[in-house]
Image: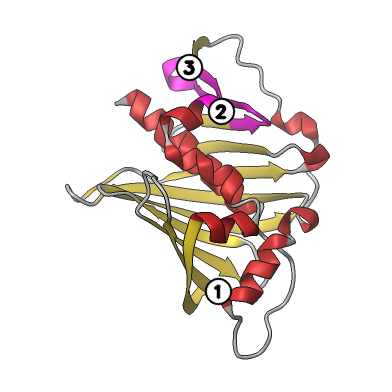
Amino acid sequence: MRERRRRWIMGGLLSLMGLLCTGLPGSARPGGVDLQTVIRNLQAASQRLSGLRATVVHQRVNSQLGVREPQQVGTLRFSTGGNVRRLRIDYTEPQSKTVVVNGNEAILIEPALNQAFVSTTNEIAKKTASTSLLTVLTDARQLSENFDVALEGEETLDGQPTTKLLLRPKGKSQYTRLEVWVSHQNWLPVKQVLHTRSDYTTILLSNIRLQSIPESSFKVDYSKYKVIRG
């Protein structure tokens, strides 16, 4: 169960990392945006987004059993400095926990269990298809190659206008579909829902601040914990 949970956490956050790479500061034209406009914005994202800080909330729901896991709340830092994608989330609820993705290394530190789970994005990708989103969503050209993308319309989310996209994988994937809400204020994905055959995970970003994040922020010392490599 813990192993499955680790894979879910890492896989979901790596998919978030890919989605963050698709954001583009800009403005929406009156009357909304069409799908091609959204895709063009996504294609320029990696050149425009260098770093951000935000509050992240995500929750997994077993749709078959109707069981909701506790919401996980934390502070997210993201950077593409030096052409290396880095992600760090320091959770405060429901318990202290840190997730760091630094290039090809992925670390999950759980102080309550006195352990650190250390792996690579490549190794995790062998275990869960969700990590493929890290590369697929970084480049919008691959987006249309790997997903059937539909424009679902515009919605107001927490007072801000967004465009909702529906993505269906063309090939084999653990996900049946993905829903993504892109903010018109900063063209970042502020909400995503990842659906599998048995559950779905919702990830929300708020208090987004575009800023440079120093490389040192993604370095963690886990030597005092029991290290599990996989």
Looking at the rendered image, the disc whose residue lies closer to the viewer, 3 or 1, is 3
Please state which amino acid type lies under the numbered disc 3: Gly
Single out the residue that lies furthest toward the left: 65
- Identify the residue shown where x is 55% and y is 48%: 16
Q: Is residue 127 visible?
A: yes
Looking at the rendered image, the disc whose residue lies closer to the viewer, 3 or 2, is 2
Give the residue pinned by disc 3.
230
Label 3 CA crowd tier, 10 Å (few <14, some 14–19, many 20+): few
Provide residue 38's location: percent of width, then percent of height: 62, 71
Label tally: 3
- Element assignment for label 3: loop
Provide residue 126's location: percent of width, then percent of height: 46, 28
Which part of the image, by quadrant, shows the N terminus? top left
Precedes in sequence: disc 3 or disc 2? 2
- Identify the residue shown where x is 39% and y is 45%: 173
- Alpha-carbon distance for marks 3 and 2? 11 Å
- Element assignment for label 1: strand
Label 2 CA crowd tier, 10 Å (few <14, some 14–19, many 20+): few
Give the residue pinned by disc 1.
162
Please state which amino acid type lies under the numbered disc 2: Asn
Name above or below for residue 18 compared with residue 187: above
